[in-house]
Amino acid sequence: MKRVRWFCVSGLVPITLMLSLGSGAQAGDPAAIQQKLNTQFKLTTTAADRSDIVTAGDVAVIHKPGLLMYAAASPLPPSNTYKNGKIGQGWGGFGKDLAITMLAPGGGTAANYPHRPFVPEEKCWVTGIQVQKDGVLFQLYSDPYDGIRYYANLKIPFPNKKEAPSVDAAMQLVAEVLTVAPADNQGGQPGQDNQGGQPAQAGPYAAYAGEYVLEMTGTHYIFHPDGSCTVRNPGGTETQFHFIVEGDWIRMTMKIGNSDFPMGSFKKQGDKLYLNGTIASNAELVRQGDSSVPAPETDSVPASASAPAPLQAIPPPPPPADAPPPTIAVGQTKEQVTAAFGQPMRLAKIGTKEIYYYKDMKVTFLNGKVSNVE
């Protein structure tokens, strides 16, 4: 009996060893993943105070929604994590905000630093890549938006947190979120003109370039590929705005002093844009043609230019006479609030609570719905 038991036990040794070796062969090598990423992404070097770029690397394209960056003046970058097809901040972001608050001078908090959400197909620089045991950590940096540069950390976790995937699987996972822009679309800057701080001829802006007419008032909106918008009125003058693209929405803003103020929103459907998403003939902008020339720098246009609406119609263009003014109520969604009041001047996020700051109003959301208005 002893010989039989010894035979059974000793027979398990090579089987166990083979299984162990087979399992180890399937796991990836973090060092190999790091080397591959370093080869694919040429890193950008910034000044010690993060105020500017010293050596430019590759321009990267963001493919998933939800990335949030803080102004480079923040003592720490915010934490973002890719999960279930989108980017979020979660509890890691909440913890980082607490750390920022502890380091902020003068009793400030993380909310004191300007925040900027980035949408799919916007661009940025990569200043650092670190392959960790459970994922890849990217350090991202933006060009100036109205004179402010932003930065953030982005974690892309591995599917199995206990081991690294193969190099090919890791690269495929990263490519879902971040890729290097093609050589013919690098343009020297990710999404901004470094001199003027306005969107450059890249990203989603060019897709919306063209001239539109608001049926309700006859106002002409000329969206330029650089992210600016010329609004023509009947008095022969023009007003310049900026716009950002968020999915099917165009958000209009205007620079007043050192702040950007929301000036209305339009939702795109086919070749038409609808004021505040109102699908009605009197609220639609009908496309007239393409606009590939830069916005004019003068405040006047030739008398022959078509522009039949008063400047007072901007911003935003007035609603129909019988339309009530925009209102806000507890229980409304973020989409309903931004459709009525535009994008906030800044926002703060603490766990499941988000705060939108407008010029004369502070709106608190809990689990995505309005819980308090001040």
Image (spheres, rainbow, N blue to C red):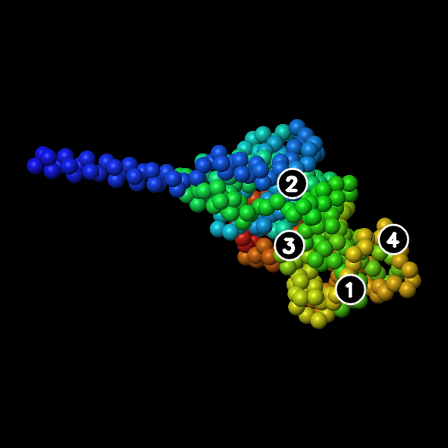
Q: Mark 1, residues whose alpha carbon is within 10 Å: few (<14), some, or many (≥20)?
A: few
Amino acid type of the residue that numbered disc 1 sits on in the rendered structure: Gly
Secondary element under disc 3, as helix, strand or loop, is: strand
Is label 1 in contact with label 4 (beta carbons under 8 Å)? Answer: no
Which is nearer the N-term, disc 3 or disc 4?
A: 3
Q: CA distance from mark 1 to mark 4?
A: 22 Å
Which residue is under mark 3?
246
Residue 287, x across and y down, in percent: 75, 65
Amino acid type of the residue that numbered disc 4 sits on in the rendered structure: Asp
Residue shown at 60%/58% (left/top)? 336
Foreground mark, 3 or 4?
Answer: 3
Residue shown at 44%/45% (left/top)? 159
Q: Mark 2, residues whose alpha carbon is within 10 Å: few (<14), some, or many (≥20)?
A: many
Quadrant position of residue 238: bottom right
Which residue is under mark 2?
58
Relative depth, front residue between 216 and 44:
44
Q: CA distance from mark 4 to mark 2?
A: 38 Å
Which residue is under mark 1?
289
Foreground mark, 4 or 2?
Answer: 2
Which residue is under mark 4?
299
